[in-house]
Amino acid sequence: MNADRISVFECLPRREPQGGFTLVELLIVISLLSLIMLALGSALRTTAQTEERVDARLHRTDELRVANGFLRSVLGRISAQKMGAMVAADASPFFFSGSSGEMVWVGVMPARYGAGGRYHFRLGLMDGEGGTRTLMLQYVPWVDAAVQPNWGQAASYALVTGVTALSMQYGDFSEEPPVWTQQWSVVDRLPQRVIISLQTVSGPWPEFVVAMRTMPGSDPASGGAVFGGGRR
């Protein structure tokens, strides 16, 4: 009887063992997938940060190009126009003053930047949004030699944002070697060069060295044509 029962069971088809993963194998796979996702996330984050840095550098380069070109345009032709009112013996008779943090002069606004003609200009730092400071150019239309500019009604043009420090030096090339000073105190002539140094939140900028050329005939006492406005 037992022999017959055994022979019957032996005749039944045998089941193959079922395939699958053990718990240890699943844990290993999950760990590997986690490492791969972590590496991909880090790569994507690095790519995004690199893109932001490239965008910031491109913006800084474009801002530098625009500011450099604009300053060279408005500082490249300054007026030797003298004030109509009497001034002290130790004061400059010109519509010009220059210190380390601010410069005021009379020049010509290039037509491509707006209404051309002769203007009073003032370059310096002004407080901006979020506690930052901006290198700002203010300008007021020229009236005549007897009228001082009203800076309360001046228009403004933002040149560089996020400025932390500004320093300007003025070059006197009438002597050899040339003399550079942060406070222009010469009363009988205007500076021939200016160096503008900027520090921003993203780092120092290359120095601007601008040649300041006096417009021919800008002094009414001299003969010749007057550029950037009629003679008053």
Image: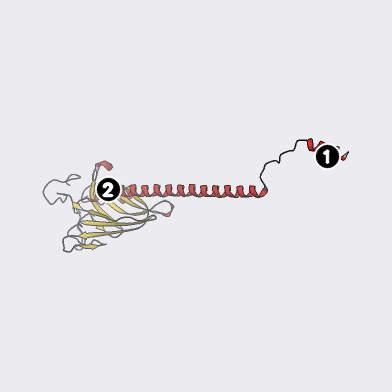
Colour basis? secondary structure
- Residue pushed farthest right? 1
130, 188: nearer the viewer = 130
Of all residues, the one furthest to the left in this rendering is 223
Residue positioned 39% across, 48% down in the render: 54
For the N terminus, the image quarter is top right
**x then y, percent, for residue 157:** 32, 47
**Residue with the mark numbered 1:** 6
Residue 207 in picture, x, y percent from top left: 29, 56
Identify the residue position indicated by label 2 in the image: 69
Q: Residue at x 43, y 49 (%)?
A: 50
Snapshot quadrant of residue 209: bottom left
At numbered mark 1, what does the secondary structure look like: helix, strand or loop?
helix
Q: What residue is rendered at 42% in x and 47% in y?
A: 51
Amino acid bearing label 2: Gly
Residue located 50% across and 50% down the image: 42
> Regarding mark 2 in the picture, which secondary structure is present there?
helix
Tell me which amino acid carries mark 1: Ile
